[in-house]
Image (cartoon, coloured by chain):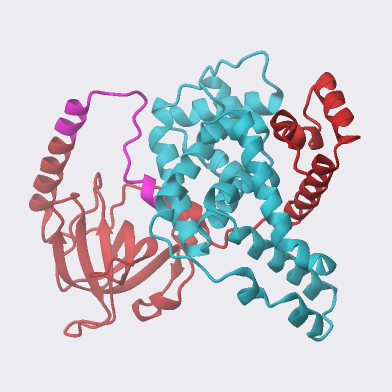
Chain colours: A red, B cyan
Amino acid sequence: MKCLRIDVSRKLLPYLHGILSESDAKKIEKHLSRCTSCKAKANRLLEGDSFARMIPAVNSKENGWSKLEAAISREQFPTSRVPRAFMRACAVITVLSVTAFFGWRVGRLSAKTPYNFESDEYRTVAIHEMPSNTEPHVVTEGYISEVRFDHEDGDLLFKLVENLGQSSPFVICEIIPPSNLNTPAVGKRVRVYGVSRYDAKEDHQWYEVHPVVAIEPVK
Amino acid sequence: MFKKLFAFGAKTDPGLNEQDAQEVSLVRAAQQGDHGAFRMLYDSYHGQLYNLTYYTLKDSQLAEDTLQSVFLKIYQGLPGYRFESSFKTWAFRIAVNEARNQLRNKKSELPLTVISGSPQEIHEAPGPDEKQLLQQREAIVRRALMELSPKMRIVIVLKYIDGLSYDEIATVLDCSPGTVASRLNRALEKLEALLAPFRSLL
């Protein structure tokens, strides 16, 4: 017959886990000694508990930090909360400044970088090898076939191809503000350092170097 | 590293143990924009939170992507974090909420017996070696866990894999410790019912 002592039922698992007070534990023990229904339930819980302890922990296979680092590189780290209107004004000023900056430097190319990076930490990957690459930090080389400015988030994008005149294979490279990298010019051959990723959006589905951390001209 | 952390003048509660005090210092340093400190927090919780997202979502790639959003939200939320709960429960709470959001578009999966075979079929299979046996056991238990409702899976993972206390789980799930016990109760009974036919294999 099913036991109607809800108070006991509720405390059964904390009792089995040994976290009840001494007086409560004694009450449960006393009840269990004469209630077959609750004793059966306690046995089921113990069995379930032993099964739950067998559940294996799983390990992540990805190097998530590199991706996260790339994502937070977009963030301006605020040390205190500031009014939203002020943030909005800052965002507008930033976008305008970046637009003006990129407009001013169009056509110029240099190897300047705002990041302190060790070039030997970047694995050389040809553009056509991007699909099989598993390294987060890559350096790839090619010709710039297109340059675009993304007005929505202030990024500067350029398309890198292995051969001018051939639209693929290609990789999309994104310079994210704030950045003092100069806008590369179409037709130039460059070496691009940055974080490798795949853009899975339905209308994208391409490989990217995003963010670009350095650009070197290749002669 | 720690010299640098303490240079920020992190105040710690004298009631905290050394590990908690170190974490408070790390969080305060991260709040000041110290990426090294944030990396250490990431390394501390990445594994536990991955288990939570993986077992909640039942999809490793989705779990990885969700984990990325979780840590980004933690990063974005750090300036507003006021130590009202421990960093651990705060981080787990963000992870639970994010995983629940991701769950909305998930499709249901095949029942346990379809995936792992009936107990008779498994008995008749060629005798596996020890490693295979362990893998088989793990697979059976894992699949049984996946059969539980998301609410039950979450509470089981928080308790048995991530090792949170009743009080910590209650804070993460925003409920009372009594509710935690009640959910765990139902989850364990269900797990027992699902795995009882496989007992001889476990």
Residue at screen point 8% across, 50% down: A104
- Is A20 rendered above or below residue A124? above
Q: Residue at x 45, y 48 (%)?
A: B100
Q: Residue furthest front?
A: A1
Closest to the observer: B124 or A142? B124
Residue toward you, A69 or A109: A69
Q: Which residue extends farthest top? A: B14
Quarter of the image where the C terminus of chain A is located = bottom left
> Would you place residue B18 above or below residue A114 in this image?
above
Q: Position of residue B124 (x, y in %)?
A: 80, 85
Q: Is residue B152 left or right of residue A72?
A: right
Q: Quadrant of residue A80?
A: top left
Answer left or right for A60 relative to A129.
Answer: right
Rendered position, B115 above or below A97? below
Q: Which residues are magenta?
A: A70-90
Residue found at x 73% / y 62%? B195
User: Is A83 contained in the magenta span?
Assistant: yes
Residue A153 image position (x, y, % from top left): 19, 49
Q: Position of residue B182 (x, y in %)?
A: 64, 38
How far across and down, in percent of the image, does residue A167 sit? 20, 82
In magenta stretch: residue A89? yes
Q: Is residue B109 visible?
A: yes
The quadrant of the image that shows the N terminus of chain A is top right
Dividing the picture into quadrants, the one containing residue B107 is bottom left
In the rendered image, the vertical position of residue A144 relative to residue A168, given as above or below:
above
The answer to whether any part of residue A118 appears in the image is no
The structure residue drawn at horizontal position 25% and vertical position 82%, both measured from the top left corner, is A168
B184 vs A27, left or right, is: left
